[in-house]
Amino acid sequence: MTVTLDTGAAARVASLTREESAEAEAAARRVLASGADRVDSAEWVGAARAGWPELPLGLRRPLHTFRRDSGPSGVLLLRGLPVDEAALPDTPSGAGSVQRAGSVSAAVLTMVACGLGDPAAFRPEKTGALVQDVVPVPGKEAFQGNAGSVLLTFHNENAFHPHRPDFVMLLCLRSDHEKVAALRTAGIRGAMPLLDEETREALSAPEFVTAPPPSFGGSEGGTAPHPVLSGAPEDPDLRVDFAATRPVTDRARRALDELGEAFERTGQSTVLAPGDLAIVDNRVTTHGRSAFRPRYDGRDRWLQRTFVLTDLRRSRGSRAGDGYVLD
């Protein structure tokens, strides 16, 4: 195995060799040559699924390991992936920007999604595109979402939704000018030792309500009261969005404040470079972003994002035609 794998308390890191990156690019270009040129089509996903086994073993092996056990951080950082930098256009700057046409980066994201489970999207968000652009948008600087450039608070992706993603994938195509925009991650596995029994008990009670994020068109409504922590007490699942989750009791408010402090103490920050793919286990780890200053000159920070469900069948009633988009 030619990939180096670090399994410490920080994100696991796997770096592709130059040869492995070339193999991955060749696999991506075979997806592009399949004739399925629409990223959201079943044919595209089928070509990407067929292409998954053609990716280098050094890429597939750490992904299989991570899928079974995402480790203390719940984050895997893959470095050296092909994104065809020389052919990239200007960074998009429009609200709702997505990748519809085939590209090397879209093929890489879809193949990796098929290796982890199935790609998925939500129709109210970015019109249900499977590969979405995460870029700063003029006038949206203070937006608590992918279009903003202020500090983005820690959150589980779509924490309000019953079929929220199992994994969130963020592939860097272009860094910000000053290289200060950092992906911030913080997980419950790292925070648990800092939480006392009373706080854990409060977080495990159905005393929190979470509203949809602004990217779904507004924050009206919300969930029924739910716990922030659920499942195995020694390794619980996490469901929280610090910009959208509201405690409904005093003890829940205190517990949420303590969880936020624990996340600030144990969180990690990573400035992504072109070809870096960060995969976040959305079941146990939150993510956010540090602030940065966009220039809107065509060379701003540009990530592409794809969601993954490990059991697509669970959401069958929400997906028309057994597709990949949840209504």
Image: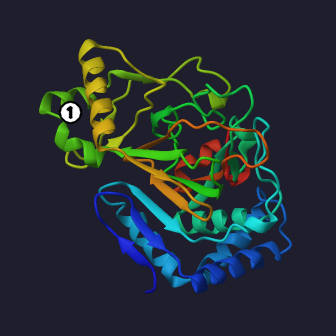
289 above or below 70?
Answer: above
User: Which of the image's four quarters has the C terminus?
Assistant: top right
The residue most toward the front is 178
Q: Secondary structure at mark 1?
A: helix
Q: Residue at x 62, y 57 (%)?
A: 172
Which residue appears farthest toward the left when viewing the image? Answer: 197
Quick one: quadrant of the N terminus? bottom left
- Identity of the residue drawn at 36% across and 40% down: 238
Is residue 92 or residue 285 the one in the foreground?
A: 92
Report the front residue among 293 and 131.
293
Q: Position of residue 207 (x, y in %)?
A: 32, 21
Q: Residues within 10 Å of mark 1 (few under 14, many from 20)?
A: some
Q: Looking at the rendering, which quadrant does residue 291 occupy?
A: top right
Inspect this view and state whether residue 160 appears.
yes
Q: Please indicate whether residue 30 sits to the left or right of residue 117 in the image.
A: right
Residue 9, given in percent of the width and then of the height, sits at 28, 58
Q: What percent of the width, then of the height, locates residue 220?
A: 59, 17
The answer to which quarter of the image holds residue 248 is top left
Kindly identify the amino acid type of the residue bearing the numbered disc 1: Arg
> 293 or 46, which is in the foreground?
293
Please name the colour scheme applied to the rendered image.
rainbow
Relative side of 190 to 51, left or right: left
Q: Is residue 272 above or below residue 208?
A: below
Instruction: Residue 43 in the image: state x and y as whole percent.
Output: 78, 66
Q: Would residue 310 be visible to someone looking at this image?
A: no
Q: Is residue 178 above or below residue 242?
A: below
Total number of numbered discs in the rendering: 1
The reply, left or right, for residue 47 in relation to residue 249 is: right
Q: Residue at x 71, y 62 (%)?
A: 106
Q: Which residue is mark 1?
A: 200
80 is higher (above) or lower (below) than 174: below
Taking the spot 52% from the left edge, 47% from the top edge, the residue there is 165
